[in-house]
Image (cartoon, rainbow, N blue to C red):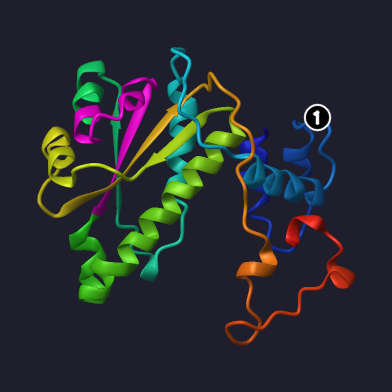
Amino acid sequence: MPFDAIAKLGRSRKGIIRKDVLKDVPGIQTRQEVKDIVLDVIKDRRTVREFQKTAIPDNVLIKILDAGRYAPSAGNQQPWEFIVIKNSETKKMLCTACFNQEFIADPPVVVVVGMNVHVSSSKYHERGEKLYGIQAVSAAIQNMLLAAEALGIGSCWVGSFSEQAVATITQCPNYVRPAAIVLFGYPAEDPPAPHRQPLIDIMHYEKFGETYLTKELYGSKELF
């Protein structure tokens, strides 16, 4: 997927077609086609738990991490920290810290995503620490997952682990809270699309329990 092109086109807020970008992307001629690709990446992303041993090139990994820092955050505080783990022994220790989920030791790259509490609480205090920081880190993780998908890299967001154990393994200072562990690697499996709740079951219009979605208006079976 042409992730670089998508990123550059995203800076064109008025829909201007960046010919200097498009000329290097075979089959992509309009901004609308790029938008469609972005939506495809969102829908095609899967959680991968089986990985090839092939290493991720550093320039590809940097693109994934860089996508993370472009996530939104309250007050643009950007409270995330990315700890990249490639060492096999460290990954085994993380596996233990994740309550012996063995697949965590398999991918070539494991990223511990931390929330910097000093940053997240500096402007918004308790609400920044308890809510805004988590929201920001979550947005950064999703950016990285989508960037990985666009670059042909499988990923898995892991939330079940001992925070204290992970903090000790990665030598995080006491103001950096491990919020998630994300696995990256070339996939060795092709997981099927998981079930998604119909939009009509979760979308509310003006107040909870009211919706204006109808098959006549939208016609898409995926929504119902």
Extreme-top residue of the structure: 53
Which residue is at 34% across, 30% downward?
110
Q: Badge 1: how crowded within 10 Å, few (<14), some, or many (20+)?
A: few
Which residue is at 47% across, 33% downward?
155
Question: Which residue is nearer to you in this view: 15 or 74?
Answer: 74
Q: Quadrant of residue 164?
A: top left
Q: Is residue 97 magenta?
A: yes
Magenta residues, start to end: 95-115
Extreme-bottom residue of the structure: 207
Where does the image place residue 131, in percent across and percent down from the top left? 31, 68
Give the labeled residue for mark 1. 26
Q: Is residue 139 magenta?
A: no
Dot 1 amino acid type: Pro
Image side of residue 95 versus residue 47, left or right:
left
Image side of residue 119 versus residue 153, left or right:
left
Question: Which residue is nearer to you in this view: 192 or 15?
Answer: 192
Question: Which residue is nearer to you in this view: 118 or 182?
Answer: 182
- Disc 1 on helix, strand or loop? loop
Extreme-right residue of the structure: 216
Which residue is at 45% across, 41% downward?
66
Which residue is at 67% across, 32% downward?
1
Question: Which residue is nearer to you in this view: 21 or 183?
Answer: 183
* 176 lies above or below 185: below
Image side of residue 188 versus residue 113, left or right:
right
* 74 lies above or below 169: below
Where does the image place residue 134, in percent across and percent down from the top left? 33, 60
Q: How many marks?
A: 1
Where does the image place residue 120, in percent across and percent down from the top left? 26, 64
Q: Quadrant of residue 121?
A: bottom left
* 222 lies above or below 211: above
